[in-house]
Image (cartoon, rainbow, N blue to C red):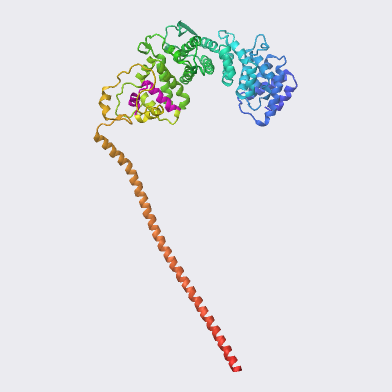
Amino acid sequence: MDLRVVIEQMETGEQDRALAVLQSFNTEMSQCFTFNREEAKEREHLGELLLGFLCRELQPSCLLACLETIRILTRDKHCLDPFISHSAMLTLARYAGIANESPCPSKNPDQEVIVEALKSICNILLHNEIGQVVAADLHLINGVAERLKQCNHTTWNHQVRFFDLRLTFLLTALRVDVRAQLAQELHGIKLLCNQLEATLGLSWPDPLVTARAGFEGVPLEELPPLSRQQTELIMEILKILFNITFDTNRRKVDEEDAAEYRHLGALLRHCLMSRADGEERTEEFNSHTVNLLGNLPLLCLDVLLLPKVEHGSIEYMGVNMDAVNMLLEFMEKRLDHGHKMKETLLPCLNLLTESSRIHRETRKFLRSKVLPPLRDVKNRPEVGNTLRNKLVRLMTHIDTNVKECAAEFLFVLCKESVSRFIKYTGYGNAAGLLAARGLLGGGRDSGIYSEDEDSETEEYREAKPQSVPLTHCQFNSVGNVFQDLDKMSANITKPINAKTDTVLSAMCDQTADIHVLGVQVGEAESRISDAEDSRLQAKFGNLEKQISEILDHDLENCSRRGNHA
């Protein structure tokens, strides 16, 4: 639709005409996310007209149409000037019901109006730094937090709750001051834990042990999957909590904060063990959960092990290992995907590493899964499809962060014992980490671990004298060594000999060509020499003839002078 037509109808000021043209424009542009730069001025002028309309008393249908058009216009990051002033942002905040200066214009707010205003504010924050500053100055986070406290009320529909959370996520992701304000002044962790608990519909049969209301006593893995709407809300909550706890594991926390984080850890354990609607959505859901678990203080991660061992649970040393096993399975899935290792694998790998470092039961369980007693002594540590093989292969990954984290995880599972680390990974693979720590000569790093237990199998004891430290795999006998060397030599020399023969043949062909060319050059030189000799002889003949003629002429003149005398 021609923007000039829309502007002409808006400039009349009549609501009915404006409503008709805006509804047509909104329908046509509903899926438009790229805009013609030549119409930028017209779009900005239309934005100014719409904000003018919002300052009037409007019919509900006209009000909604105006906000829908603003939502479409704010997708264009190059034409946001009309919307980033304090007055414009305040107007939108009022219709969103999150302004501090005055309440929402309607006593019974239309939730469609609220959602459209929230979407527009989200677009502005996403695309414009000035808009972010204005939103912080207007303390929009306070208004959103007030509504988030009403998480148990049925007043607000899913859309309002979702875009309240999305706006909170953007504010905390883009503004450090808002992040600190939500975490400290507004008690954001408690606020969002209440949101998370209400969305999951939880009960607490024991302290720090959760169950889904109405399904008490049912194992978590047997619960029905979360609905799509629940999953959407929970993932937004997890992302906000990640923003406001980003530096938690880097600082000390007091007892009150530790209790709050352990409460959050119990909720995250429930999330980790829950399923979403579909495998991809479940993996995304687990990813956000793992990212947030990595922010918790390490001592608070013991809540992952607190539930009692029940029928169907994975038990190790008398402890429920369901959550740790879920983390291990999630890590292996990400490892098998092999895509964006740094972003997808490292959060889980780091979480398991630090958990193993601080919790003995977790480390022993993970070691039994990742580094079981060594029986395969014929293949290199990186060859195979076991989890150990996959992690050892990562130790030579092109990305430095990936290979360091993989090596660190295995080193911690070996209780930072150099000899044991080399035993499971081979000296060549282990050399990078050991060199970085100054442990190439052996010994143990400064970690505090329980006493070593004997992990050598009969197969390993028998093969140990014949194993090669560099690769830490077995050669069956000296004869086999020479056979292998002969095969390696043959495999190396065969292509070299073939290449040499090819080069020599080419050189011989080139030599023959050069010889023929030399003969041809000699013949050409001979012909040139003969031609030059014949030319010189002709020249000499001509000179002799000319000299003879001159001499004859002189003699004739002399005789004439004699006769005259």
- Residue 54: quarter of image: top right
Q: Quadrant of the N terminus?
A: top right
Horizontal side of 139 relative to 10 (left or right) equals: left
- Residue 319: quarter of image: top left
Horizontal side of 282 relative to 132 (left or right) equals: left
Verify whether residue 412 appears in magenta.
yes
Residue 262 in view in this figure: yes
Q: Residue at x 68, y 19 (%)?
A: 86
Horizontal side of 472 relative to 67 (left or right) equals: left
Residue 74 in view in this figure: no
Q: Which residue occupies the foreground of this view, 355 or 497?
A: 355
Range of residues picked out in magenta: 401-426
User: Relative to 83, is 482 above or below?
Assistant: below
* Residue sticking out furthest to the top: 205
Where is residue 72 drawn, in percent x and y? 63, 23
Horizontal side of 346 relative to 10 (left or right) equals: left
Q: How many marks?
A: 0
- Residue 240: quarter of image: top right
Verify whether residue 33 appears in magenta.
no
Q: Which residue occupies the foreground of this view, 271 or 87?
A: 87
Q: Residue at x 34, y 49 (%)?
A: 501
Where is residue 98 drawn, in percent x and y? 63, 13
User: Relative to 515, is 239 above or below?
Assistant: above
Where is residue 137 drawn, in percent x and y? 65, 17
